[in-house]
Amino acid sequence: MVQSFPPPRPRPRPPPPPQRPHPRRRPPPPPSPRNKSRDGSDNPPLPIQKTGTSASSRRTLSHITLIVSLSLVTLFPFLTTYMSWCNAGNTSSTGLIATYSEAPVANKLAIIQQKNKLLAIDKRGGSSLPLPPEYVLNYTGHTTIWDKQSFPCYAGENTFGDSKPIQRGFIYTKPFKSASSTLSGIAIQTAINMAKRMKVQTPHCLVRWNHAQPKEKKYDALIKAESYLWTFLREPTKRTISHFFFDEVSRYKREPHDSLMKKYMMSPGRRYYYFNEFSLTSKYHAKAIPQILDMYDFIGIVERFDESLVVLKLLLGLEYQDILYLSAKSSGGYDDGVSYRKSSSLLGWDGGGKGKGTCVYIVPSFVSPGMKTWLESSTWKNHMSDQNALYAAAYQSLDRTIDKLGKELVAEQLVEFKRRLKIAQEICTNQTVFLCSDAGVRTPNEKSSCLAVDSGCGYDCYNNLTFD
């Protein structure tokens, strides 16, 4: 027989130790008239259970709060710009596109457009520098003084646009991204006005305005006494940067990485660009400067745009109406797209200038902090030294010419010209039909207010204004 035993009894638990008051907490106060409940009874309100923190924790929390507040205040402008980029880029609700390389073309251009509000450095022709670049001040090479001449007005063709070489006439050489479309308009309207004054039997005097090399246009065959060859130079580094954004970024829709920008700017074609455009010899370096200055009858400076136009007026005996202008195109605007071929991965080739081109947004130029440092390096300065010397020679030649004409006379006429120019631009800008609207809509050539493609826009308006 198996003996059974009762289950063992559980041992009683020891009573809990008495609770000791927290050394940093005050015990609840005894009941008193001041501690009556809200209903007026004598029952005291329950004590509030605090989850107190130590003094060091509270100080740490205060420091964190202060740091976050200061960070938000400091980053507020950048956060605002960030949000504007989100809106400009048409991004989804998930936020801004992660990187520039992941963005579609339309968003890339919008991002760049917003980015340039902070980084834009490129201002189209007419802006003036407070002081010339240091290399201009240090230049001690060949310069010249442009002389007064009579305007060479000879019977021209009945239509504009002929580019075949000529031996006499009014000839403007167009370097890219040097206010060349605006200056082409000045060349055309001057040829029209002078034909009327000199009673030539054609609509305009013989005139040329071409992107061309001197050898192609046979400038060596020009009759010096019957021709006037002129051009404008833009500061070489600024011109090269603008050309990069116009070609590679705006036309080809390439990303403006520093590596691509350096590769473009360091090519031989960029290093000797001005010499390739202006020199008749194979000397694409500073030794060709005397030949260029002697061949040209006038070279203006884009950074001294209006002042150079006034000097041109005085040298040729022109009128103020001859040099008035509306800017043909500018960064942040649109190019008419006439010269873009699809076969070259460009946009909107119009089949021969018949007004079917596609307007192309001109992405404003900018440089990153890294590129800005690189542009100040000896590598870049040595690369551009020959072009800088040509620019410095033209800059100082303009100064010498102004000295000969009389600084007071030039200053007086510059003030008057700026007065008329302001009136003309205020009145005529809204009345002029450009090839591309502010929204990028292309206007057929025959319906625009331009003399030839995108040049001389607004001429019929400002040429008939009275300024007295």
Image (cartoon, rainbow, N blue to C red):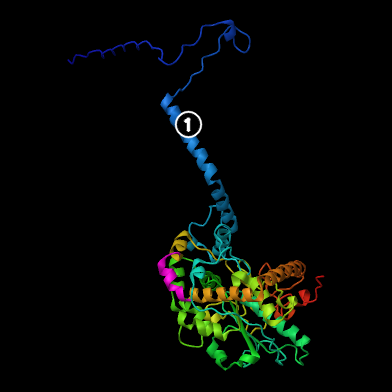
**Between 413 and 276, which is closer to the camera in this rendering?**
413
Q: Report the amino acid beneath label 1.
A: Ser
**Between 140 and 114, which is closer to the camera in this rendering?**
140
For residue 378: magenta? yes
Whole-percent x, y for residue 355 in the image: 67, 80
Whole-percent x, y for residue 75 in the image: 53, 46
Say which residue appears at 43% left-offset and 67% top-offset. Answer: 259
SS category of the residue bearing label 1: helix
Q: Is residue 58 left or right of residue 77?
A: left
Q: What's drawn in magenta, residue-wise?
A: 376-386
Say which residue appears at 45% left-offset and 29% top-offset. Answer: 59
In the rendered image, which quarter contains the N terminus?
Answer: top left
Whole-percent x, y for residue 384 in the image: 46, 73
User: Which residue is tagged 1?
Assistant: 62
**Residue 455 visible (yes or no):** no
Which residue appears farthest toward the left when viewing the image? 1
Q: Is residue 22 left or right of residue 301?
A: left
